[in-house]
Image: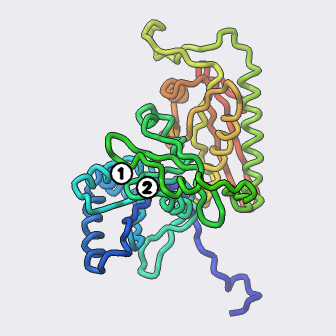
Amino acid sequence: MNPQDPSAEPTPDLQLEIAHLLLVDVVGYSKLLVNEQIELLQELKQIVRSSESFRAAEARDELIRVPTGDGMALVFFHSPEEPARCALEISRVLQDHPSIRLRMGIHSGPVNRVIDVNEKTNIAGSGINVAQRVLDCGDAGHILLSAHVAEDLAEYRHWQPHLHDLGECEVKYGLRLHLFNLYKDGLGNPQVPEKLRRGRRKHAPAVSVRPITAPRLPRVVLLVALVASAVALVISSLIFLKRVPPTTVARALAPGAKATDGLAAIPEKSIAVLPFENLSNEKENAYFADGVQDEILTGLSRVADLKVISRTSVMQYKAGPKRNLREVATDLGVAHVLEGTVQRAGGRVRVNAQLIDASSQNLSE
């Protein structure tokens, strides 16, 4: 092979996806006899496969299962609710199996699928690495969540009472993760993990601990972040400078409906950022479209008095058949909707965004 010949270098097909990961491992696994390990993993496999969330995702072909030696990783792709529900369902069944002591960790983040030496699909990327760090902080019975997942779930009333802030946990290499503990109705472990208790007992202010930081990003990703931040600034300016006498607007009404139908008022300073459509030829560039949406959401969430709908709530409106934006705004309870497209060619990225006033469907491009 000629090292100077570019055509001789392998060019792996790296497709990044946002995954919602549930990592499970058996506490005290290494202390078991080999026969006991095999029997326990077989029993655990049956318990996990009996989970309703597992079966539903598997039926949609939206689940990857990866053995990890002393447990497994379940990789979902639809919603962060899936691993959380699955963890609770597993915990419920484990009440009848007190000899199996599990701990679980949940995180959402970028991954890519790889084919291992056995020609089976495996997972790599920062998403599963962080999920492993989350898991490492727990004890038997714990269902620990990264702050990223907990914040998404907290947008829903039925999850809020069961998410308990643990603060930061120091993991490998002096990095810190902000964690939440999920427990309800006797499921999960309400105790503070021993690793966090030990950290709280330490009083060493002279020791500096590095926060987890993102790796240095390619120039095109930085460009996307800058463009998305600029879009967020323009959007917030348009919303706040628009002169609307009342502070709220009524929900959009269907033809023939009356204003007395009991529809709630919608704050004028409210917006939903719909998933951006990827117009690039390469499918892997869909990751950039998701990144633009995330950056805009991050920028808008910093604007005081502006109601911003979470990313999880708008994912059902992914680009596809033409969307009725007035109905979308009504469903989400917002006065404005942002939609757009992302197109990448080489090192250049084109972002097109449209801000729609849902009540009139007037737009600013």
**Relative to 214, does residue 6 appear above or below in the rendering?**
below
- Is 242 displayed left or right of 17 in the figure? right
Q: Residues within 10 Å of mark 1 (few under 14, many from 20)?
A: many
**Rendered position, 273 above or below 89:** above
Query: Quick check: marks 1 and 2 in contact, CB under 8 Å?
Result: yes
To which residue does mark 2 refer? 76
Q: Nearer the viewer, residue 274 or 116?
A: 116
Does residue 160 appear left or right of residue 279 in this picture? Answer: left
Q: At x 74% / y 38%, what residue is drawn?
A: 231
First in sequence, mark 1 or 2: give its number: 2
Q: Secondary structure at mark 2?
A: strand
Residue 354: image quadrant is: top right
Which residue carries the number 1 mark?
86
Residue pushed farthest left? Answer: 96
Q: Nearer the viewer, residue 212 or 181?
A: 181
In percent of width and height, residue 39 lies at 25, 73
Residue 63, above or below 290: below
| Residue plotted at (64% across, 40% down) | 340
Which amino acid type is marked by label 1? Answer: Cys
Question: Which residue does the image show at 60% across and 49% down from the upper left?
Answer: 290
Near mark 2 (Cα within 10 A), the count class, few <14, some 14-19 or many ≥20, is: many
Residue 87 x/y as whole percent: 37, 52
| Residue sitting at x 27%, y 55% | 94
Is any part of residue 318 visible from this angle? no
**From mark 1 to mark 2, how far is it between C-alphas?**
10 Å
Q: Amino acid at mark 2?
A: Phe
Residue 154: which numbered mark, if any? none
- For the residue pair 72 and 6, the one nearer the viewer reads as 72
Q: Position of residue 158 (x, y in %)?
A: 41, 34
